[in-house]
Image: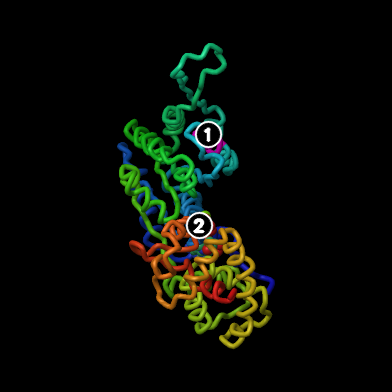
């Protein structure tokens, strides 16, 4: 089929965005509330969820709402930054990357709307502080200069505040900072907390996997308190239906997906957005017919599943160690829904389970109880034997 609006490789286009009504409403209300106040107290949001559940799609949608839905109602600027491991090694590298990304983000915004703002950003000066070395270093050039992030952002706000009511900073994949420089969380929190006490209206939105937030919760309670957490779950049947039908309707694709097919896709994917997008993309690539019924779907599905094995599961499997592979296969053979390390024998230490959780292949359900991240992955592992 020529018209194919589905793609599992990229965040969903905001026009096709399905479900998540509560979070969208929370965001809308927070923005409205925080743009109509002289005393800012922005609600910071942590969008949490496992691999492929729609975190990036969510922040892309927020960005789109700011640019389109809120336009003319409130004056909000947004910057969306995808964190990368290399820019999260310490606070200096991070601050530098953040400032650079903010500059870039505003440069690509529509110049006619943001012309004045673009000028402000172009002239925005970075404040620095000099770090005195613990042991005096003779050579002058070894003096350390670092970006004073709080001052720099305060400086930006003071230049923007006549034209802008709120700046939303979105940090996608915050776990890179957690993994590489956990103290950065405190630096970030302190920075944005201080900015708010100085009257600068910055709202922070972060995304990351659930498990990291739970783990950090124990050691960094002040950090987690700084955000309202929202956990993204798979879609219910209605959500799956919307994710399938909305793009088809918007694009006027000449195809009718029968309800029975939607139900089948829901039961196979359990409402996981990545798998829904994957199946739909591949389904539409393979059909010419206008009506897709269960018979046609069942005929095409084995081929789609094969594609999924190579595109996703094989890659997942190949990037773990031999021992982890062995554990995954053993887990797949257990009939119980939830598995504990002792179920697969003594020599499989809980650490291997933890590593597989951090790699996103196992989900920790409760203390010491795990499951493979998706039944389709389980099926793939069973097929290897
Ligand atoms: N709200 C949604 N409506 C429709 N499709 C969605 C939605 N959210 C996610 N998807 C689909 O799921 C796929 C994965 O989404 P996304 O990349 O946003 O997830 P993620 O949580 O950021 O993943 P990762 O953990 O890899 O960063 C997308 O390609 C998209 O097709
Ligand atoms: Mg993402």
The answer to whether 147 is drawn above or below residue 249 in the figure is above
Q: In whole angstroms, how far apart are the C-alphas of marks 2 and 1?
A: 25 Å
The quadrant the C terminus occupies is bottom right
Q: Nearer the viewer, mark 2 or mark 1?
A: 2
Q: Residue at x 43, y 48 (%)?
A: 206
| Marked residue nearer the N-terminal end (2 or 1) | 1
Q: Residue at x 56, y 13 (%)?
A: 139
Which residue in the structure is indicated by mark 1?
93
Q: Residues within 10 Å of mark 1 (few under 14, many from 20)?
A: some
The answer to whether 384 is drawn above or below residue 89 in the figure is below
Q: Mark number for residue 25?
A: none
- Magenta segment, which residues? 95-103
* Rendering coords of residue 218 (x, y %): 32, 48
- SS at badge 1: helix
* Rendering coords of residue 49 (x, y %): 43, 58
Main secondary structure type of the part rendered in magenta: helix
Q: Is mark 1 within 8 Å of ligand 2?
A: no
Magenta highlight on residue 102: yes
Magenta highlight on residue 64: no
Residue found at the very far top of the displayed protein: 138
Image side of residue 198 versus residue 61, left or right:
left
Which residue in the structure is indicated by mark 2?
359
The answer to whether 227 is drawn above or below residue 8 in the figure is above
- SS at badge 2: loop
- Return the residue nearer the eye: 326 or 111: 326
């Amino acid at each position: 089929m020529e018209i194919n609006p589905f793609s599992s490789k990229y965040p969903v286009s905001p026009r096709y965005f399905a479900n998540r009504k509560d979070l969208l409403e929370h965001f809308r209300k927070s923005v409205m509330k925080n743009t109509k106040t002289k005393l800012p107290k922005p609600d910071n949001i942590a969008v949490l969820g496992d691999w492929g559940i729609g975190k990036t799609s969510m922040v892309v949608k927020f960005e789109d709402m700011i640019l389109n839905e809120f336009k003319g109602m409130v004056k909000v600027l947004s910057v969306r930054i995808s964190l990368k491991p290399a820019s999260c090694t310490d606070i200096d590298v991070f601050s530098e990357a953040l400032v650079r990304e903010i500059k870039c983000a505003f440069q690509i915004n529509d110049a006619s709307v943001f012309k004045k703002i673009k000028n402000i950003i172009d002239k925005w000066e970075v404040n620095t502080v000099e770090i005195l070395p613990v042991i005096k270093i003779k050579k002058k050039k070894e003096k350390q200069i670092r970006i004073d992030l709080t001052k720099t952002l305060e400086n930006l706000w003071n230049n923007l505040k006549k034209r802008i009511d709120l700046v939303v900073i979105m940090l996608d994949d915050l776990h890179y900072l957690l993994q590489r420089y956990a103290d950065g969380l405190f630096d970030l929190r302190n920075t944005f907390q201080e900015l708010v006490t100085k009257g600068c209206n910055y709202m922070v939105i972060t995304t990351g996997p659930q498990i990291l937030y739970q783990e950090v919760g124990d050691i960094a309670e002040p950090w987690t308190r700084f955000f309202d957490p929202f956990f993204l779950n798979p879609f219910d049947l209605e959500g799956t239906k919307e994710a399938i039908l909305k793009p088809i309707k918007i694009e006027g694709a000449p195809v009718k997906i029968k309800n029975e097919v939607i139900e089948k896709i829901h039961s196979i994917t359990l409402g996981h957005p990545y798998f829904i997008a994957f199946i739909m993309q591949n389904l539409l690539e393979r059909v010419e017919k206008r009506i897709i019924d269960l018979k046609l779907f069942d005929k095409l599905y084995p081929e789609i599943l094969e594609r999924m094995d190579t595109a996703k599961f094989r890659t997942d499997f190949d990037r773990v160690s031999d021992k982890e592979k062995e554990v995954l296969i053993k887990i797949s053979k257990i009939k119980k829904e939830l598995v504990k390390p002792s179920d697969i024998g003594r020599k499989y230490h809980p650490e291997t389970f933890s590593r597989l959780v951090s790699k996103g292949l196992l989900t920790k359900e409760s203390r010491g109880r795990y499951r493979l991240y998706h039944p389709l992955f389980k099926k793939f592992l069973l097929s290897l034997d």
